[in-house]
Amino acid sequence: MNGIREKEQEKHSPIRRSRIGMAGVGAAVILGVVLVISIIWQTENTPIAEAPAVTPTVSDGQDALPGMEGPRDPAEAGHGKVELPAIELPKDDGVMMDMIGLVVYKGNIYTQTGTQITAETAKELRGEKLGRTTAGITEWSTQADYTELASTIGEADIYAVQGYDETFRIMSYEEHDGQVFAELYEHLNGITVMRGEDIAGKLKLDGRIASAQWQDFDSWNMGETRLEELPADASLDAFIKALYEAKPVAENQLMEAGIYDAGSGEQKFLYLNLEDGTKVELRLFKSGPYAKYSHAQVFFEMDAEAFGALWDRME
């Protein structure tokens, strides 16, 4: 990862923001050893997707309506694929690695996420116990230390999350003196993304939004919690459907173009409160327009009409 990405992810990490709104709930609280700085990614061979502004069309040549089902074949829709690079493990002893909270499970690396849960939600969603982590990974660890259930979070019980595939999401869960400490971890590296559904579908957004809120960039950047209510109406439904069909664009391409340097009026944060109690954060960029989730190194190029209709409601 180059220095630009490290600075950007440290300053604007959705994980940094999510901790502010989760009093007492987080891996950093479990044993105080999560290192929230940045993560080294294997970017040298990451394909870069082109990002032309294309409005989806229906068969008669007219513009497609927001939320209308488009072609399901990515090639037919004009989509390219984006390979999300696997986390690069240190190859040599003595090489320091900056990292965020992570857990190794079934050979995959799960990292902290942009989805929040409360203690009550964690109790309800706690599924089958998968094991207990060890504290084997530090910033000086080598590849040999990345054994099953090794982690940066110390010792914690790991569970499946009811309603979600454990190949995507798992949960740490501990109870101490009547208090619940829980954290979600997601596998969003070393995978291929063909459309927005490849991530939004894992989050199970469609048809499950109970309420929504938004926050402007300045409030988020200052670590404040000035959330505004947003009706869960037809415009939000059309936005979610458009997100499922959105075109993936590799993050490094847009980062090099300075997308994170856009003014405060060009970025907003959307919070989706799902029926199961999870709270999903999406970062929206007016240019493009784009939506981005968590640390996944991919942006989703949205249908301009569906995006704009929702953006205009956030005033």
Image (tube, helix red, strand yellow):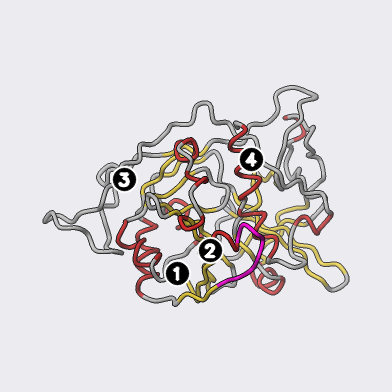
* Distance from Cα at disc 3 to Cα at disc 1: 31 Å
Q: Are marks 4 and 1 in contact (CB under 8 Å)?
A: no
Amino acid type of the residue that numbered disc 4 sits on in the rendered structure: Lys
Query: On screen, 126 above or below 293?
Result: below
The residue located at (38%, 53%) in the rendering is 289
Mark 2, residue position: 216
Q: Which residues are magenta?
A: 220-227
Q: Position of residue 57 (x, y in %)?
A: 20, 54
- The numbered mark at residue 314 is 1
Q: Are marks 4 and 2 in contact (CB under 8 Å)?
A: no
Of residue 208 and residue 305, the one placed in the foreground of this image is 305
Name the element at disc 2: strand
Of residue 221 and residue 46, the one placed in the foreground of this image is 221
Q: Position of residue 121 (x, y in %)?
A: 66, 72
The residue located at (45%, 40%) in the rendering is 254
Name the element at disc 1: loop
Mark 3, residue position: 74
Amino acid type of the residue that numbered disc 1 sits on in the rendered structure: Met
Q: Position of residue 312 (x, y in %)?
A: 38, 67
- The numbered mark at residue 7 is 4
Lower position in the chain sequence, tag 4 or tag 3: 4
> Residue 90 lies in magenta, yes or no?
no
* Distance from Cα at disc 4 to Cα at disc 3: 33 Å
* Distance from Cα at disc 3 to Cα at disc 2: 33 Å
